[in-house]
Image (cartoon, grey):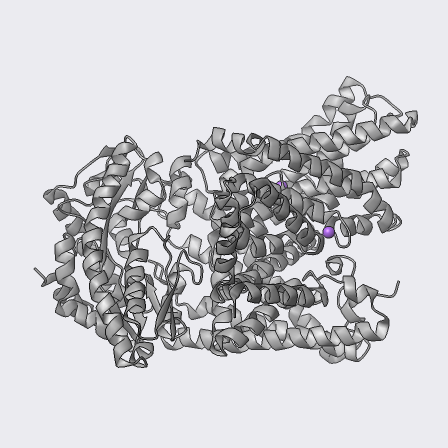
Amino acid sequence: MDPLFLGAIVAVATILVLFSGVSVALGLLIVSGGFLVIFDGMRSLELMPEILFGKLDNFALLSIPMFIIMGASISSTRAGADLYEALERWLTRVPGGLVISNLGACALFAAMSGSSPATCAAIGKMGIPEMRKRGYPDGVAAGSIAAGGTLGILIPPSVTMIVYGIATETSIGRLFLAGVIPGLLLVGLFMAWSLYSTWKSGDTNLLSARSYTWKERFEVLPRVVPFLAIILGVLYAMYGGIATPSETAAVGALLCLLIAIVIYKLWHPRDLWVVLRDSTKESVMILFIIAAAGVFSYMLSSLYITQSIAEWIGTLDVNRWVLMGAVNVFLLIAGFFLPPVAVILMAAPILLPIIITAGFDPIWFAVILTINMEIGLISPPVGLNLYVISGIAPDIQLKTILLGSLPFVACMVVAIVLLCLFPGLATWLPDAVMGARQ
Amino acid sequence: MAGHSSAAVAHAGNNPFLRAVAAISTLAGWVSAAMIVTAVAITCQMIFIRFVLNGSTVWQTEAVIYLVISATLVGLPYVQRLRGHVNVDLIPLMLPKPARKALAILTLSASIVIVAIMLWYGYEYWHFAWARGWRSDTIWGVRLWIPYLALPFGFALFLLQLVADLVAVLLKIDQPFGLEDR
Amino acid sequence: TELRLSHQWSNKDIRHQVAQIVADEVAAADVDLDIKIFGSKSLFKPREQYKPLSRGQLDMTVLPLSYAGGQQPAYNLTLMPGLVKNHDHAARLSSSPFMEALEAKMADDDVMVLVHGYLAGGFAGKDKCITSPDDVKGLQTRAAGKSFEQMLAGAGASIASMASSEIYNAMQTGVLSAANTSSSSFVSYRIYEQVSCYTPAGDVALWFMYQPLLMNKSTFDGLTEAQQAAILAGAAKAEAFYLEEAKKQDAASVTAYEEAGVEIAEMTAEDFAAWRAIAQETSYKKFVEEVPDGQALLDLALAVE
Ligand code: NA
Ligand code: NA
């Protein structure tokens, strides 16, 4: 059978299986097993556990549970509240100051956590009730946190960047740096939108009711210092010759656990178990998807589908930006339904040769891909962050959260356009810190 | 994906089989978490040895890799019990209850079949490594049957939890896809 | 019939070209046989290839045989410091009783050799040249292969184990100060951007790695005589090419490092002897302890002039 036609059949079968409600990882294994048996014979089933084990046999994967522990231990404390409270005391005169503080806290928290749901939960737990109390519309309160939470996978550290780095063999250190400026750009766009919408609503109550004295402003700073220390410490370890990015993650995890225990008095075994349980749950889920997607990509390669698609695209004579547009639409649609890790692992082996042939930079593309995945996290029909928010604030309707997030989706689209116009936004920092690539 | 956070932990009711499986899966979860913590500790020890003492680090990388793999495989049943394996439950949510139940039975059965296959060949792979005395090709030279043990072990427990989930749906102790009536 | 060949290299690499020659010759022979090459790790990870090969799930592969040293400890002799002196010596080893003994081990795993071939490698230092054992004392070093780790540790280096793809970043951030790997990896991972001195394989070289084209024996036996003849003819042609190109790799790596402004150092015969003395006390000794017929195999290898 023509591999391209076979590829189309695999795509349809995968969509059908994943929409049946089976878990994503097992669904990928089912599809892989089915096609391997039909086209490679029964004996190929023997290989599945071996390949699954082999895909996990990679030191860089260690950083996934580590960066998740960092986020989970901090989010189990009242650190999120401290972060935005500190920001708010300094931004009190700004219209919509509280939303802006929360967005800033999301960005800071994202620099300590590798995952988006953790960022969302950490800031949202205190931030959403506070915003609603001060009269912000439910949609703005929920939408800003849902969107701010997505920064967890763009601002380093980032679990999806690690997965992309492994799948495409690009430097994880470089990928992390590439996310910094686009992350700040997104924070800026989110804040700009919040300012504009608060200003337009004309509700003067959204100015903070009280103003803070300088003493109050400074006395809150020490509470933020440990987090800044962690962020700087991790960066120093990573780029200063102490450890590789994957090893640094373990230091970060240890530091965050220690801060949670020592400063936030999280020493009851039951509280610690909650942190470990949540981290284990998210890590195992992601690692199992990585392993299953590895078997899936073995199947695609073994049936010569990956190779044939790459060859086919190479023969197409289309404008590279048309191609990039098509890739973005594909990623958006995939991101609507699937968790980011699964999209990256299934798409990277097929998309990357196309991207490179068309003359795009794989580091830059990682950022584009990540922003697409962020959109998926807060968009219908299924978005992980939306559900995290509705878990935190059960009385806000899902529809309200969704509508509140939409303007932020528009901001992300603007960011993608800006990155296409100015690729240096993503590539300048890694080149400046780690030297230009050939 | 909604299943990740909108659905509750699997219900066991008063059924002794379901409760026993739940207990085993929870135990597996503790083991998995302990292995992740151990991996953190070993990595920090490695950085200390190398950066502070300028010593050799020959076994740590490998130990950490095998710990993370084992944590993943052994953690599978626990995450299944917590309904932590993400799924796309758009279609199940749209279906009327009887159809939803039929679909749940179908997907659970398919999951059981694929995990049973992984268990069978995972056991075979483990046995191969054990019988032939395979070691890793490093100075440490780990006997590979030890890390490979996570394959049959993890998939066996995962299989058990999936069977329990199917039983719970059939006995109406738990809702299909863990979706409560809204 | 279709055979599947897996390897880890890009389609510009010499080892891909070796596989391609066999595939092309077989196709030209028109014996209803097609060799499909899965390069760049697109099917199996580098170290995951020997197991499916020996179980008949993969038909052919090009790989460093020492990757399978965990399954057949005797294979560690194919990456032993100082055992091979230069490329011509390597070629003589390939047709010696030593290689016959190794091929007997492979036959136990249902594996056979189609194309023999050795590739050489060297050392690179971040801040200084690595020529004699004294140069590595106290340096965080990444070595390619277990026997080299043992020897370098014996010379007083600190061993950091990591994948060859991580060398670049580890050198850049200062986690590593010295590395040892193959000439082609030194070029393909662009390590010349991070080091100040390169010690290539020259008249004498410490690091030689046996990287044959292997085939599953039962699969080979199941082919028709015409098909077998076509494969063997292609393999003979590939082997001659492999030896010629292997020599050129070392020179090409020197050019790449010179162009990048890296100092080129040379290992003298005395340096070589000093390394080998350490190796005899460390990696050779460990090998003989670990492998039941290790001493006999080692003697066979050392007997090759
Ligand atoms: Na982050
Ligand atoms: Na979505």
Expressed as whole percent of the image width and height from the top left, the position of residue A302 reads 47, 66
Q: Nearer the viewer, residue A83 or A389?
A: A389
The residue located at (61%, 31%) in the rendering is A421
Say which of A33 and B60 sits in front.
A33
| In the image, residue A187 above or below residue C235 | above
Residue B3 lies in quadrant: bottom right
Q: Can the viewer see residue C234 in this picture? A: yes
Vertical side of C269 occupied by C31: above or below: below
Which residue occupies the foreground of this view, A431 or A418? Answer: A418
Q: Is residue C144 left or right of residue B112?
A: left
**Residue B141 at x, y percent in the picture:** 35, 62
Q: Is residue C98 above or below residue A166?
A: below
Residue at the extreme top: A214
Q: Name the residue located 82 percent from the left edge and 50 percent from the top edge.
A: A390
Residue A245: image location, x then y, percent: 50, 43
- Left or right: A140 with respect to B77? right
Q: Residue at x 20, y 65 (%)?
A: C236
